[in-house]
Image: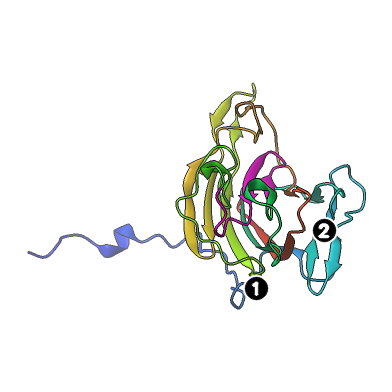
Amino acid sequence: MAEQGDPKDTEVWEPQPKVVTPGNGTAPPSDAVVLFDGQDLFMWESAEGGPAQWKVEDGSFTVIKGAGNIKTKEKFGDIQLHIEWRAPEKIEGKGQGRGNSGILFQERYELQILDSYQNKTYANGHAGSIYKQAIPLVNAMKKPGEWNLFDVFYMAPRFSEEGKLEKPATMTVLLNGVLVQNHTEIKGTTEYIVPPNVHPHGKAAIALQDHENPVSFRNIWVRRLA
């Protein structure tokens, strides 16, 4: 028996979706903020606010041991982030001492970067973990010296006017096109020894960690979702 009614009753015409032109492959789409295009660190600064001191060469930049963390000059909330990174081809160290860095969302919540290829370490410290909080679903790492790709969908936490947490931050992460975090709730700030902390904040920078390993980065762009 045919359904009764008018199909127009379920059609929504306004507002029409904003037009965004996709990039070719992993190139940024038309509405992205390009954080590194292979040329310089103009969009970045040191953790203290001075010039970023990491080394730019051959279309990428690399951690300089002891130079400290760097962070974006712009502040962000909800975002889609694309970032490519590479651990050194020459294997030095083991566990957390091998190809270690991290992406700190809003300068607080760390998505782990590590050379996890055939490198045993604690499960919530692997590449693609929300460090010390959430184990990645799988290990999708490429060999040392090859470029890895993170595509991240990050939703910032929401706080009441009184500073009470109303909705925790969440993160969905693809590592080399493979799902490793699926809308994972973030428990609080990334800590090394003590449990995560929760405290109110607004938009903040994206930071990259100097863990004294020469990890390299390229093709970094972000889309503001809110």
User: Looking at numbered disc 1 in the image, what kind of residue is underneath it?
Assistant: Ala
In the image: residue 53, left or right of residue 136: right
Q: Is the C-beta separation of discs 2 and 1 under 8 Å?
A: no
**In which image quadrant can residue 169 be found?**
top right
Residue designated by label 2: 43
- The residue shown at (72%, 41%) is 107
Residue designated by label 1: 27
Q: Residues within 10 Å of mark 1 (few under 14, many from 20)?
A: some
Q: Dot 1: what SS? A: loop
Which quarter of the rendered picture does the N terminus lie within? bottom left
Between residues 121 and 64, which one lies in front from this camera angle? 121
**In which image quadrant can residue 141 be found?**
bottom right
Asked whether residue 40 appears in the rendered view, the answer is no
Residue at far top of view: 162
Colour setup of the view? rainbow
The picture places residue 99, in percent across and down from the top left corner, at 69, 55
Between residues 17 and 57, which one lies in front from this camera angle? 57
Q: Residues within 10 Å of mark 2 (few under 14, many from 20)?
A: some
Q: Dot 2: what SS? A: loop
Closer to the N terminus: mark 2 or mark 1? Answer: 1
The picture places residue 16, in percent across and down from the top left corner, at 51, 64
Residue at far left of view: 1
Residue at far right of view: 50
The picture places residue 150, in percent across and down from the top left corner, at 59, 60
In the image: residue 140, left or right of residue 201: left
Span of residues in magenta: 100-120
Asked whether residue 152 appears in the rendered view, the answer is yes
User: Looking at numbered disc 2 in the image, what kind of residue is underneath it?
Assistant: Met
Asked if the stretch drawn in magenta spans residue 119, the answer is yes
Q: Is residue 203 above or below residue 61?
A: above
- The image shows a total of numbered marks equal to 2
Q: Is residue 27 above or below residue 61?
A: below
